[in-house]
Amino acid sequence: MLRAFADRLAATALSQQFQNHLWVVPTSQAIHILCICVVFTSALMINLRLLGVGASGRSISQLTGSLLPWMWAGLVILLLTGTVQIIAEPVRQFVTPAFWAKMAMIVVVATMTAVFARKVRANAARWDASSTRPAGARVFAIGSSILWIAIIVCGRFIAYTSAFYT
Amino acid sequence: MNLHSVLVSLQNLWLSSVVRGDIPGTEWVFPIVETCHVLALTLVFGSIVMVDLRLLGWTSRATSIARLTEETLPWTWTAWVFAAITGSMLFMSKAVTYAGNFEFRMKFVCMALAAVNMLVFHFGAYRGVAQWDLARPPAAARLAGGLSMTFWIAVIFFGRWVGFTT
């Protein structure tokens, strides 16, 4: 069923347009990578700060306040450029488990980050002082870092695993 | 011994054939090395662009530039070394092809320009950082930030294009 949908999507006029203009996919991928840089570096900076490494000049609430807007903006552009790549090559994306694992992990990490952001906003003082910071902060920091790395790995492996399933 | 023969002998090394996946059991080496390259470069670009945006005065205006630079530079260099090692491994696998590729050459021209820009900034405008550490940087510093961001964005674009043209 998924394969049938992918085939139908690949036959649409828009998908054909993307496929015929050979610059569309590489350009979209390059913008995708630029946004990954912004999102991943920001996430890692916040996570390391939660674990007590680096960025000691800024409190958790200052750091999240300045970095999270960039992360959300980056994520929106990632979804848009990702959608362009899905429309251009739907079969390549939909057939491989690497794509679905990536999507599932994005939902999890985005939800985790939204919950984390809300908690920091609700009680900045508690999160800024390392003595009162919830124990969950470390779990979040480690979990989110692992998820972002796994998302990038899966993203790159879509290209290498698709051939097995088509 | 001319450049071509050097490239050929580089390509004929045992490690090159391993990265290329020529030896049974090494088929996944290239994708793994490439994924490590992507992970490393996200941190290189992410940390550089954070300083560039601050130099341009677009973000983190309350953060000291000297402090931000001090905190991010060790990460930039560590990640850059990883990117350079993994990048060299990728290059070895198809040295002749990459060396003759236009996008590959342009990527290195842009990286050289970024290096020159960094040196000019470091030994020029940055020496007076104490005067504008917490203010809007002078024109020379803003220019350095803008140029750095432009060159590195170009590096990523050309880098992604190499994958489509080799």
Image: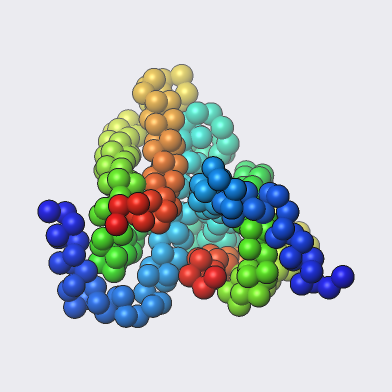
Q: Which residue corresponds to the image point at 57% horizontal and 61% vertical from the top-left?
A: B52
Q: Position of residue A73 (x, y in %)?
A: 34, 57
Horizontal arrangement in the rendering, residue A150 relative to residue A58 (left or right)? left
Viewer-nearest residue: B122 or A21: A21
Which residue is situated farthest in the left direction here?
A1
Q: In the image, is residue B78 above or below residue B1?
A: above
Colour scheme in the image? rainbow
Q: Position of residue A155 (x, y in %)?
A: 39, 51
Q: Position of residue B15 (x, y in %)?
A: 68, 49
Horizontal arrangement in the rendering, residue B36 relative to residue A163 (left or right)? right
Q: Which residue corresponds to the image point at 39% horizontal and 31% vertical from the top-left?
A: A143
Residue A106 visible to the viewer:
no
Q: Which residue corresponds to the image point at 70% horizontal and 60% vertical from the top-left?
A: B11
Residue B143: quarter of image: bottom right
Residue A137: quarter of image: top left
The number of discs equals 0
Q: Position of residue A151 (x, y in %)?
A: 39, 45
Q: In the image, is residue A165 above or below residue B11?
A: above
Give the quarter of the figure containing the N terminus of chain B.
bottom right
Residue B93: quarter of image: bottom right
Which residue is situated farthest in the right direction here?
B1
Q: Which residue corresponds to the image point at 50% horizontal and 28% vertical from the top-left?
A: A51
Residue B160 visible to the viewer:
yes
Horizontal arrangement in the rendering, residue A10 relative to residue B157 (left or right)? left
Give the quarter of the figure containing the C terminus of chain B.
bottom right
Q: In the image, is residue B87 above or below residue A19?
A: above
